[in-house]
Amino acid sequence: MKLQQLRYLVEIERCGLSISAAAEALFTSQPGVSKQIGLLEEELGVTIFERSGKRLAGITAPGQILLAMARRILSETQNMKRVGEDYAAESSGMLSIATTHTQARYTLPSVIQRFVQRHPEIRLHIQQGSPLQVAAWVLDGSADLGIATEALDRHAELLTLPCFQWAHLVVTPRGHPLLARQPLTLAALAEYPLITYDATFTGRSHIDRAFERQSLRPNVMLTAIDSDVIKTYVVLGLGVGIIAEMAFDRSRDEALAAIRASHLFEGNTTRLAFRRDVWLRAYEYDFIELLAPHLTRRMVEATLKGDGADPGL
């Protein structure tokens, strides 16, 4: 049995049982992948994949068990490399972070600045996407750490930890009539065209639920994944914006006025996630603590050793 055979096995499942797609992803030939899977089945004495002609049609019961074992073996193999890198104190390394635009633009700059000062030898890679993409990238190993407000806690394979809580703000052009209607109500907001986040981003579900609870139908005339885009269209007078509070900067957003909305919408929790089966390197623990000081290495390790439950803020 070879590790490469296990990689082929796992990749075929990931590619929807397409041998050609798996071969392409692994930069090898389709006949070579088929041959190695056949040799593996012969060695183990079981059929891993159900076949329909030359196509794979499903995974057998023993195949499911072997796939789970293969994933664990490959994960531990990768962990052995990470342990070696960690304890060898090499002068180079890579930290890949998956996150949303709002976190990358407004939360992470100061964290990354301090991290680079502490670890100038570590290369950083930041990839931005939706919360669902962030979760997927962490799950498939494309990213070491994921940071988002939604979606991360839906996957049992991920350990998710709360970083900080935040609220939404309502932003309007200066002089807007809403500024005089205090305290602000959802009914007042519903009178104006609204500009806010796409349905799966930055606490949007909390915004929708707030209106639903009062049987109000807001006129959401424009959505975006980018807080700066939302603010741009608010400045143009196209509507009233609802954004994350960290996305408003009084010194930069001089054309806008902000109204606190914590009494209107549920609070939001930004979370950090990583695979439960991954060995965290020392500099990853440092990054986590810089992002959320209460998430010390001792606390994270204790959570991993326990039941993995969310420790709360």
Image (cartoon, rainbow, N blue to C red):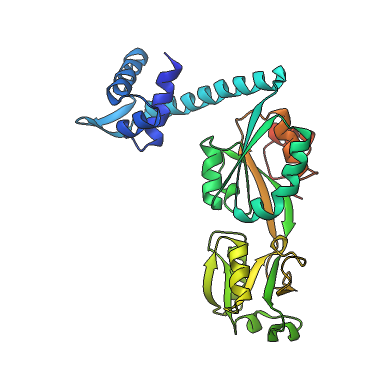
Q: Up-down: is 152 above or below 43?
A: below
Q: Residue at x 63, y 23 (%)?
A: 82
Q: Is residue 88 left or right of residue 46?
A: right
Q: Position of residue 237 (x, y in %)?
A: 60, 79
Q: Judge by depth and name the residue closer to the eye, 300 or 136.
A: 136
Q: Against 222, is 274 above or below?
A: above
Q: Based on the displayed image, in which of its 4 quarters is residue 95 positioned?
A: top right
54 sits left or right of 96 in the view: left
Question: Is residue 209 among the parts visible in the rendering?
Answer: no
Q: Is residue 173 left or right of residue 222?
A: right
* Quarter-of-image position of residue 98: top right
**Residue 251 visible at all:** yes
Question: Where is residue 83 shown, x and y percent of the image?
Answer: 66, 21
Task: Give the image location of residue 259, x and y in percent.
Answer: 74, 74
- Position of residue 192 measured from the top left corner of the image (x, y, whole percent): 59, 82
Q: Image point 41% across, 30% down: which residue?
A: 11
Q: Is residue 2 above or below residue 203?
A: above
| Residue at 34% across, 25% down | 48
Q: Nearer the viewer, residue 7 or 70?
A: 7
Judge whether 104 appears above or below 23 on screen: below
Quarter the N terminus occupies: top left
Numbered circles on residues, count: 0
